[in-house]
Image (tube, helix red, strand yellow):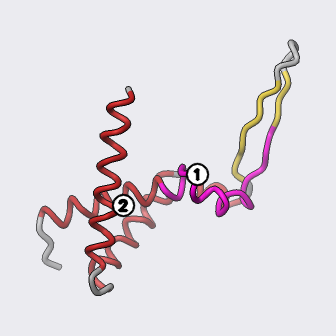
């Protein structure tokens, strides 16, 4: 299991990006939606607030960065070691992960 520092860093950023994709990104909202419930609350002034909460164990899993992060790291390692040319997909995810971090820093 010989892995250099560059590959290790690529796996870190790829795992970060994949985790964020599953837990937060709009593009995979369709996959999370069946495992969410919409909750609404109205205060005394009539202002209504709406948010989504996880439903069931799968919903909890899909909303947990820690949970998805562990499985994401596992998946990235499987791709790295077992999928021919998987490094290309990992590099794309890693660059997108680094880009999202830079974008967040720029916004704040």
10 Å crowding of disc 1: few (<14), some (14-19), many (20+): few
Residue 73 position within the rendered picture, expressed as x and y whole percent measured from the top left: 37, 65
The image shows residue 31 at horizontal and vertical percentages of: 65, 63
* Picture residue at 27% right of the left edge, 73% below the top: 88
Query: Which mark is drawn over residue 15?
Result: 2
Tally the marks: 2
Q: Who comes first in sequence, dot 2 or dot 1?
A: 2
Q: In the image, is 16 to the left or to the right of 85?
A: right
Q: Nearer the viewer, residue 31 or 72?
A: 31
The residue labelled by disc 1 is: 26
Crowding around mark 2 (Cα neighbors within 10 Å: few <14, some 14 to 19, many 20+) is: many
Nearer the observer, disc 2 or disc 1? 1
Residue 6: give x, y in percent of width and height. 14, 63
Residue drawn where x is 32% and y is 85% of the image = 83
Dividing the picture into quarters, in which one does residue 45 lie? top right
Quarter residue 8 falls in? bottom left
Whether 35 is among the magenta residues is yes
Q: Please tell me whether residue 96 belongs to the stretch shown in magenta.
A: no
Magenta-colored span? 21-39
In the rendered view, tell whether residue 74 sits above or below residue 66: below
Report whether 107 appears left or right of 53: left
Give me the residue at 37% from left, 55% from top: 16
Residue 72 position within the rendered picture, expressed as x and y whole percent measured from the top left: 42, 65
């Amino acid at each position: 299991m010989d892995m250099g520092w560059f590959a290790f860093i690529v796996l870190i950023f790829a795992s970060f990006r994949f985790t964020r994709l599953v837990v937060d990104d709009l593009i995979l909202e369709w996959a999370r939606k069946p495992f969410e419930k919409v909750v609404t609350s109205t205060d005394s002034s009539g202002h209504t607030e709406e948010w989504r909460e996880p439903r069931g164990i799968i919903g909890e899993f899909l909303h947990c960065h820690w949970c998805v992060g562990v499985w994401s790291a596992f998946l990235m390692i499987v791709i790295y070691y077992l999928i021919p040319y998987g490094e290309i997909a990992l590099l794309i995810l890693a660059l997108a992960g680094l880009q999202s971090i830079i974008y967040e820093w720029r916004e704040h």
